[in-house]
Amino acid sequence: MKNYADKVEKTMALIKRNPTEEILTEQRLIEYLNNGVKLNHYIGFEISGMVHLGTGLVSMQKVADLQEAGANTNLFLADYHSTINNKLGGDIDNIRKIALGYFSKALQQSIKCVGGDPERTKVVLASDFYRKDALKYLEDVIKVAKGMSLNRAKRSVTILGRKSGDDISLAQLLYVPMQVADIYSQNLNLPHAGMDQRKAHVVALDASKNFSYSPVALHHHLLMGINITEEQRKQVLEARQQKDRDKLDNSIIDIKMSKSKPASAIFVHDSEEDIRSKINKALCPLREVEVNPVIDITRYIIAPIFERRGSEMEISNAKTGAVKTFAGIKELEEAYIKGEVHPLDLKSMVAENLIRILEPSRKYFASGEGLRHLNDLKELMITR
């Protein structure tokens, strides 16, 4: 019994560690583990352009954790959802081409970058799944939609990267019921996404009364864009202080790293020069660790990967050559707040470590199949 309890505790620790921000609910997850329920995970993606650090390294760290925890992991390429949200011009054929080419390969390379195994994660194209049992899926969409009010559907459009009150199409109102039906139609009990998808997962939990089980929703941190302004930073801090969920959701949309805003993002195939240049230009307020894009990357990418490897972070002082070592993010942040680490030295550490972490992906997309997939996407982005 003690060994089993230790196993449950270890599994919980893997699932809860960074970049996890929320589990709805931990109690249900513990019940699953205690009862020996197999964890069937999925994370869904719109096919909307190049894969950045948030989509790649942050979300795939959690996939790697779940692999280690013994879960079945699935990457769901949401082609119909992408056309509803007008990604890549809304052309379903182009979306499918990029989904099965560049996008799926970028996610698999990202898993490799963070120490996971791409071969242990299933890749599912949404339309292929729907063709197998279209009637069952339609019934599940209707079940979910019947339990939602129109007002709730409108409030939930933030999961599409829209703000509450934006002008939206009728098809976009179907997006959340479709996303929830994706979970139940595939019998998935561990849906996973960034915090921006929280509203959809809350709908999924509420809808469980119409299905045979209740899932556990796992949410990871949403990486902020590196080009945010001081004004945007203040708005996020204010929304947090006021604990205004709608205001915070809208402010997060404004500052999150985004494929559609290239200046906000570092992509998993970026060159060494691009990574250094982008990090050097990033906002990094002195002695401030909250809503600081460079600290954000350190907290949710660099430090967790060092922790997984059992090694310490090192930061060199460009002026003196002195090297400071940090066992974890807490030590580093405390030193930064005290002014013991200069922003330029932190940026240098982050850039060089990102370059090392992303090496497998960068090499894959530099030639052969990877380069062809990347060029397919670039050509499409230019022509549309």
Image (cartoon, helix red, strand yellow):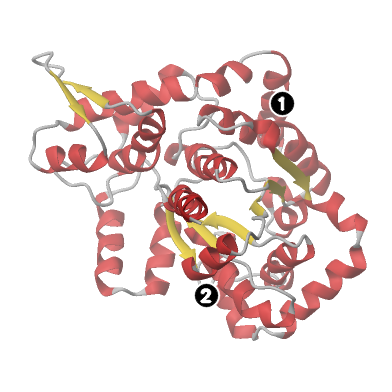
Q: Is residue 260 visible?
A: no
Q: Residue 83 versus residue 195: which sits nearer the camera?
A: 195
Q: Quadrant of residue 364?
A: top right
Q: Residues within 10 Å of mark 1 (few under 14, many from 20)?
A: many
The residue depicted at 46 percent of the width and 54 percent of the height is: 2
Q: Nearer the viewer, mark 2 or mark 1?
A: 1
Q: Is residue 101 above or below residue 124?
A: above
In this rendering, position of residue 376 left or right of residue 339: right
- x 69%, y 45%: residue: 88
Quarter of the rendering containing residue 251? bottom left
Q: Using the rendered image of the protein, determine whether residue 58 is visible from the camera's viewpoint.
A: yes
Instruction: Give the residue number, with chain letter if any, for mark 1.
Output: 373
Q: Secondary structure at mark 2?
A: loop
Spatial CA span between label 2 and label 1? 37 Å
Q: Residue at x 77, y 36 (%)?
A: 100
Displayed quadrant of residue 121: top right
* Label 2 packing within 10 angstroms: few (<14), some (14-19), many (20+): few
Q: Which mark is residue 165?
A: 2
Q: Position of residue 383 (x, y in %)?
A: 71, 35
| Nearer to the camera, 137 or 157 | 137
Query: Eyeballing the image, is 32 above or below 148?
Result: above
